[in-house]
Amino acid sequence: MLNYTLKLLMRMVITFFAIITLVFFVTRISGNPIDYVAQGLTPDDRRILIAYYQLDQSIWLQYRAFLYSFIDGNFGLSYLERRPVLDIMAERIWPSTQLLLSSVGLTLLVSIPLGIIAALNRTNWIGSAVLTIAFLGYAVPNFVLAIFMMLVLSYQLNWLPVVGNGTWAHFIMPTIAMAGALIAGLTRFTRNAMLDVLGQDFMRTARAKGLPERTVILKHGLRNAGITILSVVGLQVAGLAASGSVVVEAIFAWPGVGELLVRSALSRDYPVLQFGVITVSVAVILINVVVDLAYALVDPRLRRQVEA
């Protein structure tokens, strides 16, 4: 298990280095940030600002300084806010984490029971109705669902607030918008995983022992189907952390990392954009490592291979 963990960590380090290199050079393609942030300045003030941010140096010297920032912890100042990037990002991480946790919680709370119901009722209208709803949810993009809820629940009915995260009511629409496609996808995967185990010999043996059907389904069926469900949940959470929150946070003006990335990209705020993308990338890498380790612990076959 130790060797397997070390291999995962080594792969994580290599992936992280590739990401930070790609982020640095891609952000430079968008143009000179001084053209955006230095409007109205005199030529002398413009030269001072370029020299202060070391934008007059070669691209390789800028790249070396960028790599060195990971050693000294100085990720620079925002071009727009003139504040340390770490302070700006620290204000955004927790709101994004709250929205991510609420979306994942809603996904698990809704999709797993629906998937089990669809599997148990695969031959009647209940299973068909669940699958139809899942396919519709999977086909609707999160930004379409977000705008639809804003128009109906906020502007028409005036039930829910739109902007910010001040109260629990602010969480309802962003959480549903982010979790919509995840619920649809995980419901289908849960149904298919449950169908794979319902006809297995150990399920018939459990029923032959006289166990209640609830125990047979939840303890024996869901426990074995959970190996597949775990991998799907890991991929969904990683995808949600990587890009799923960007559009939703921008629509609802949610003060998180996603909204900050959109604003930084539009304003060419290199330090904030770079560190924001790197923060999201680290979160995705860590989620994947945790899921791989959990998968090795849950699946006895993989655990034996790892320990061999």
Image (tube, grey):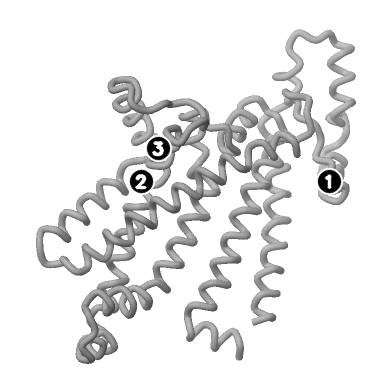
Q: Position of residue 221 (x, y in %)?
A: 31, 77
**Which residue carries the number 1 mark?**
73
Question: Residue 34 occupies which quadrant of the picture?
Answer: top right
Specify few, some or many for label 1: CA neighbours under 10 Å numbering under 14, 14-19, or 20 or more.
Answer: few
**Which residue carries the number 2 mark?**
180
Amino acid type at circle 1 is Gly
Amino acid type at circle 3 is Ile
Specify the quadrant that holds the N terminus: bottom right
Secondary structure, mark 3, is helix
- Going from the N terminus, do you reach mark 2 or mark 1 first? 1
> Residue drawn at (21%, 63%), measured in percent from left and top?
118
On screen, 255 above or below 9?
Answer: above
Circle nearer the viewer, 2 or 3: 3
On screen, 172 above or below 50?
Answer: below
Secondary structure, mark 1, is loop
Q: Position of residue 177 (x, y in %)?
A: 39, 40
Specify the quadrant that holds the C terminus: bottom right
State the residue in front, 180 or 113: 113
